[in-house]
């Protein structure tokens, strides 16, 4: 068990920070000091509701089984890869105006809506999200878009919008 009630700044870490089963951690606000790492792996932290407070220097984020997250609308500006997996109450993902190599959001059973405002994504994957019915926006540059057959929305508009953006 994590046992963190509140943090006044995580110690500096050169690589990453890992939280697992930290149900008493409700916010990332004020948890990090400058230089406190470049990656975050967080699993089974059911009281966390957002990524607000995460430093812009974080390039890798892996969020798994964090059931308190229902809506994500913030990412670090230097994000290279983000994986949001099995967050069973996540309903909406709003990717802001960033450049990112990879975004994956597999197995989010209540995810219904994704909005992409990013300028560049190399790989975007979304699979095993049976309630997904809305994918809005398109980055100005994308290499690979993968959405499995569980998508319940109208793919024709998405295909038309992305066809002009996919790099060959």
Image (spheres, grey):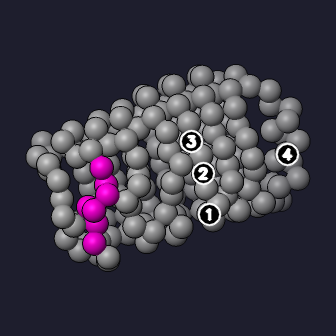
Closer to the camera in the image, 156 or 92 = 92
The image quadrant of residue 101 is bottom right
Residue located beneath label 4 in the image: 161
Q: CA distance from mark 4 to mark 1?
A: 19 Å
Asked whether residue 44 is drawn in magenta, I would say no
Mark 3: secondary structure: strand
Magenta span of residues: 27-33
Residue located beneath label 1 in the image: 98
Q: Are marks 1 and 2 in contact (CB under 8 Å)?
A: yes
Query: Could you say which disc has been placed on residue 95 in the image?
Result: 2
Q: CA distance from mark 1 to mark 2?
A: 8 Å
Mark 4: secondary structure: helix
Q: Nearer the observer, disc 4 or disc 1?
A: 1
Query: Could you say which disc has been placed on residue 93 in the image?
Result: 3
Badge 3, how many Cα within 10 Å: few under 14, some, many 20+?
many
Q: Earlier in the sequence, mark 1 or mark 3?
A: 3
Q: Are marks 3 and 2 in contact (CB under 8 Å)?
A: yes
Q: CA distance from mark 4 to mark 3?
A: 19 Å
């Amino acid at each position: 068990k994590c046992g963190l009630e509140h943090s006044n700044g995580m110690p500096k870490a050169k690589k990453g920070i890992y939280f697992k089963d930290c149900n008493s951690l409700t916010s990332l606000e004020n948890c990090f000091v400058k230089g406190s790492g470049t990656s975050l792996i967080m699993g089974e932290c059911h009281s966390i509701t957002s990524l607000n407070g995460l430093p812009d220097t974080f390039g890798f984020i892996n969020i798994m089984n964090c059931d308190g997250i229902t809506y994500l609308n913030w990412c670090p500006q230097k994000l290279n890869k983000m994986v949001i997996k099995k967050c069973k109450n996540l309903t909406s993902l709003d990717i802001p105006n960033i450049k990112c190599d990879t975004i994956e959001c597999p197995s989010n059973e209540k995810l219904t809506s994704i909005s992409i405002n990013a300028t560049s994504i190399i790989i975007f994957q979304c699979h095993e999200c049976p309630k997904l019915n809305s994918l809005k926006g398109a980055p100005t540059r994308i290499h690979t878009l993968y959405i499995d057959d569980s998508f319940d929305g109208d793919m024709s508009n998405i295909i038309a919008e992305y066809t002009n953006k996919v790099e060959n």
